Amino acid sequence: MRLFAIRHLPTEANVKGCLQGKRNYARLKPTALTQEKSLRNIEVLGGIRFDAILTSQLLRTQQTAYYHGYQDYRIEPLANELNFGQYEGTLKTEFVRKFNREWYHNIDMLPLGESFEEFRKRIFFLPLI
């Protein structure tokens, strides 16, 4: 079995450098960069037919699947982004500056909306088909 993981295309929040987490407000930012990344990914995938296409509950991941030509995707809540809690919508640079040591050396100690251990467990049980 081969597994392909594709990060969602850029959103307005990405461009601003904000943590998005579980927030579902971010639509893809329709730019030349989005189109370029989408075309590059489509070229790499080469029209591969997959047994399953999974997206998270987040609109940005569903739009990414759609823009890559995969409209028949299944929404899987276990694939949702890490919950950054009160830090969602804040600048990632400020978050990393505030929690530098934890971010790089002890991620389990970050004060997030879910522990990193909970996130790991959730992703581990993600169904592949």
Image (cartoon, rainbow, N blue to C red):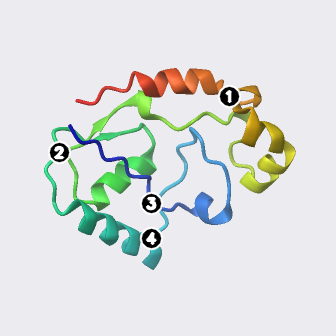
* Disc number lying in front (4 or 1): 1
Residue 62 position within the rendered picture, expressed as x and y whole percent measured from the top left: 36, 48
The image quarter in which residue 77 lies: top left
Residue type, mark 4 in image: Pro
Residue 42 position within the rendered picture, expressed as x and y whole percent measured from the top left: 26, 65
Q: How crowded is mark 2: few (under 14 residues within 10 Å), some or many (20 or more)?
A: few
Q: Relative to 12, say whether 79 is above or below.
A: above
Q: Name the residue under label 4.
A: 30
Whichever of callouts 3 and 1 sits on the residue coming sooner in the sequence is: 3
Q: Is mark 1 on a helix, strand or loop?
A: loop
* Disc number lying in front (3 or 2): 2
Q: Which mark is residue 50?
A: 2
Q: How crowded is mark 4: few (under 14 residues within 10 Å), some or many (20 or more)?
A: few
Q: Mark 1 points at which residue?
A: 113
Residue 70 position within the rendered picture, expressed as x and y whole percent measured from the top left: 22, 52
Residue depicted at 13% across the width and 50% down the height: 49
Whichever of callouts 1 and 2 sits on the residue coming sooner in the sequence is: 2
Q: Tell me if label 3 and label 2 are in contact, CB under 8 Å.
A: no
Q: Is mark 2 on a helix, strand or loop?
A: loop
Residue type, mark 3 in image: Leu
Determine the CA span between mark 3 and mark 2: 20 Å
